[in-house]
Structures are given as C-alpha cells and as structure tokens.
Amino acid sequence: MASVNKVILIGNLGADPENRFAPSGDAICNLRIATTETWRDKNTGERREATEWHRVVFFGKLAEIAGQYLKKGSQVYIEGSLRTRKWQDQSGQDRYTTEIRGDEMKMLGRREGGDAPMRGGAGEGGWDAPSPPAAARAPAGAPQRAAAAPSAAPQAGGFGDFDDDIPF
C-alpha cells in the first residue's frame, strides 16, 4: 500500500510571518501556528487544554500571500506535508528540524477593522469585498430587468427555504 504524508491544521499564528527571499528570488515565508485541544478531566470535571506549536513554511506565490495578509493572531487553515531538514549550527554540529511544507492556505476569521470574512488561498485572493449594487454592475446601455431570475444555486448560509415540516 502507498504511504501518505498529509497534514491539515486550523490554528492561529503565534507571531508575525517571517519573510525572506532565496538567492533565486523565490519568496519564503515561515509561520508558527498554535493548535489547541480542549477536554474535560474525567476525575475533576475541570476544563483542560493543551497547545501544540507547529512550524510551517511556504514557498513562491503562496509565501508572498501569507507574508502580506497574515499577522500574529490570524486564524488560518493549512494543508501540507511533513519535511525534515538537516542544517549545521555555528559550531558545525548537524541539526535537524521537522516542519510542515504548506501546499494550501485559507485565511479564516475576520479582517481587523471590518466585518467581511477572510477567505483566500493560492488563487482565491483575500477578503470578500462588498459587491456593488446591481445597477452599478450593469453596462449603461443594458436593459434593466424588473425582477431577478431565481438562482439555481442556494445562497450560502441561507436557511430561509427550508420547510418546518419533518420529512417522515
């Protein structure tokens, strides 16, 4: 059977992204992501939590996006794979570090100073912007419709079309 090396995280940045460029000019962005697990202690009933810290590295365009839009405290979804790197410290000793090489990133939560939800990834852009009114989107010579045709796709987050009747 084939092996799988896949990591999925949803967590918060513990510090601002560290951005740099490789000699080739490619962007590199390092993040420290905290994930917290909570549970109730069976004996005492107290709420407990444990936080794990993860090192994440992005390369290329995704590194540029992460460096530009993320900051300390940002909530983020990351997919990637585990990588172990070997390097030498100042005394010449071999050192190893295991980190997550991020392949996909989506910004979660809300943008500071606004109500627009954050979205983004490699090709999705950043935060949602309010859409202009229909009249502003239509070309000047285009006729205006009196009523909009019903959409085939349901509206995201809308539950107004559900009946209150139980289906059985």
Image (tube, rainbow, N blue to C red):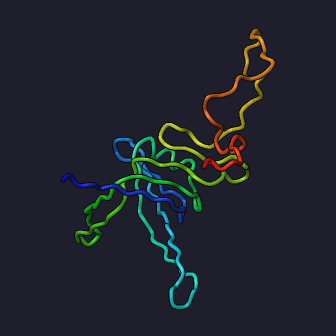
18 over 162 or under it: above or below: below
46 over 81 or under it: above or below: below
7 over 155 or under it: above or below: below
Q: Nearer the viewer, residue 99 or 160?
A: 160
For the point 58% across and 58% down, the residue is: 74
Q: Nearer the viewer, residue 67 or 111?
A: 111
- Labels in figure, total: 0
In the picture as drawn, the residue positioned furthest to the bottom comes out as 44
For the point 60% across and 49% down, the residue is: 168
The image quadrant of residue 23 is top left
For the point 45% across and 69% down, the residue is: 53
Return the x and y of residue 120 as percentages of the image width and height: 55, 44
Return the x and y of residue 156 as percentages of the image width and height: 64, 41
In the picture as drawn, the residue positioned furthest to the front comes out as 168
131 horizontally vs 46: left or right: right
Return the x and y of residue 125 as percentages of the image width and height: 56, 39
In the picture as drawn, the residue positioned furthest to the right comes out as 146
Return the x and y of residue 11 as percentages of the image width and height: 51, 62
In the picture as drawn, the residue positioned furthest to the top comes out as 141
159 horizontally vs 80: left or right: right
Q: Nearer the viewer, residue 40 or 98?
A: 40
For the point 38% across and 52% down, the residue is: 80
